[in-house]
Amino acid sequence: MEVLAFVIGVLLMAVGLAVSIALHELGHLWPAKKFGVRVGQYMIGFGPTIWSRRIGETEYGFKAIPVGGYISMAGMYPPSPQAARRDGRAGGGFFATMVQDARDANDETLHGDDDPRVFYRLPVWKRIVVMLGGPVMNLLFAIVLFAILLSGIGVQTATTTVSSLSECVPATSSAACTASDPEAPSVAAGIEPGDTIVSIDGQPVADFAEASAIIRSSPGEALTIVVDRDGAEQSIMLTPATTQGQISADDGTTTTGEIGFAGISPAVEYVRQPIWAGPRMAAENVGAVAGIIWQLPVKVWETGVTLVTGGERDPNSPLSIVGAGRLSGEVAAADSPILNRVSGFLGLLASLNIALFVFNLIPLLPLDGGHIAVALWDGLKRAWAKLFRRPPPKPVDATKLVPITFAVFIALLVMGGILILADLFNPVQLL
């Protein structure tokens, strides 16, 4: 049964990833078509085509390797210079040949040098909108998933409803009750399972953490606790016992000292959060992922070291698609209520989309952020020429950056390979 649940979890993550990719490419496709750019293909995956259908001028389909996707827009770059068209690859060397290959592929999408329905002819702001569309769709999808998780399902919270009571004040937190142990203050006061704590000494409490903080800080002090029992409020006098425990300071340090003990265990329930909790969590995750992305090479190196040495892997290290699928399978196979597993899956998929959003904004080709950087550079050149009343410059020819693009691609390939191996042989463990 666990194996079946694990497989279902992996398949669900594969479907979730496919949806994420489809939305990402849709984020590029819709504004491109809206701005009049001719789009030849909208594909999910890479490699051989397993299914496709042409609707209008665009072919929609799926390819065999579901690890990404793309749309092919006409004229991503300006036409090749006439000299390059004449000379072709003669004497150009490896990188010059790559540049010319990119130009040739680009030229095949053009309907003449004056083709109006090409990407490079769009105003700078429209090019940025088209390239931002993909990452933004991942961000919006993550916000929706976090909203379902937090506002639809809720967050497991220790509530002010009493679940059970301790029978005594044990010598230590892990000790069992003995005949010589004093009765727990909650039992002595008459608190019952099912009671809901409304206030303590006139201070309303919203969750168990607030109630516990008051009790822990009041050892030996008589407290008036108002509880809701069967719809009616009752006042109960409770004096917390004095025990030794950990006291947390404002600076995060802890010390051992006297704390109050009542012997109350809270009921844990899913508490729905305000609708803005989803966007807030998405924003927090963007900051956290950005903190990892900028040091990605170091993180991947450290992951590779643990793979070779067999050391414990950092739980916050980056994951490959294999790692995300494996975690999803482990969540699905966990021995926990189904709602917990659904919440875990939604959180994983939302975090994956946040990672796609941040990663694609890196200003390096072939990532979306690289195309945005090219558009901004083109706009800057045009603004500079206009400021000094010079003739408009030629469009930026990004095919000249193919060698850099190739280097970035190789680096991503190597890092992805290391992460896949680490996720197979030294995976991140669920706590």
Image: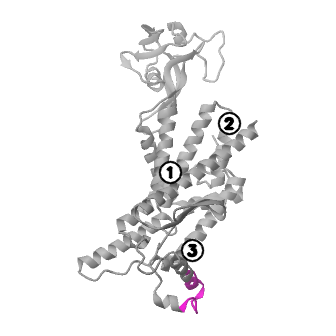
Looking at the picture, which amino acid does disc 1 mark?
Ile
Whether residue 308 is situated above or below residue 350 in the rendered picture: below
| Residue 19 image offset from top left, x and y in percent | 57, 50
Q: Which residue is mark 1?
A: 354
In the rendered image, which quarter is residue 376 located in?
Answer: bottom left
Residue 406 circle label = 3
Looking at the picture, which amino acid does disc 3 mark?
Phe
Q: Which residue is mark 2?
A: 334
For image coordinates 41% across by 65% down, the residue present is 36
| Residue 95 image offset from top left, x and y in percent | 57, 83
Mark earlier in primary sequence (1, 2)? 2
Q: CA distance from mark 1 to mark 3?
A: 25 Å
Callout 2: few (<14), some (14-19), or many (20+) C-alpha neighbours within 10 Å? some
Callout 3: few (<14), some (14-19), or many (20+) C-alpha neighbours within 10 Å? some
Looking at the picture, which amino acid does disc 2 mark?
Ala
92 magenta-colored: yes
425 magenta-colored: no
Q: CA distance from mark 3 to mark 2?
A: 42 Å
Q: Nearer the viewer, residue 259 or 166?
A: 166
Mark earlier in primary sequence (3, 2)? 2
Question: Answer yes or no: do the residues labelled 1 and 3 have beta carbons within 8 Å?
Answer: no
In the rendered image, which quarter is residue 99 located in?
Answer: bottom right
Q: Please state if 5 lies on the left or on the right of 416 as rendered.
A: right
Q: What SS does tag 3 mark? A: helix
* Magenta residue span: 87-98
| Residue 81 image offset from top left, x and y in percent | 46, 86
In this rendering, does residue 43 appear at all?
no
Q: Please state if 385 lies on the left or on the right of 200 as rendered.
A: left
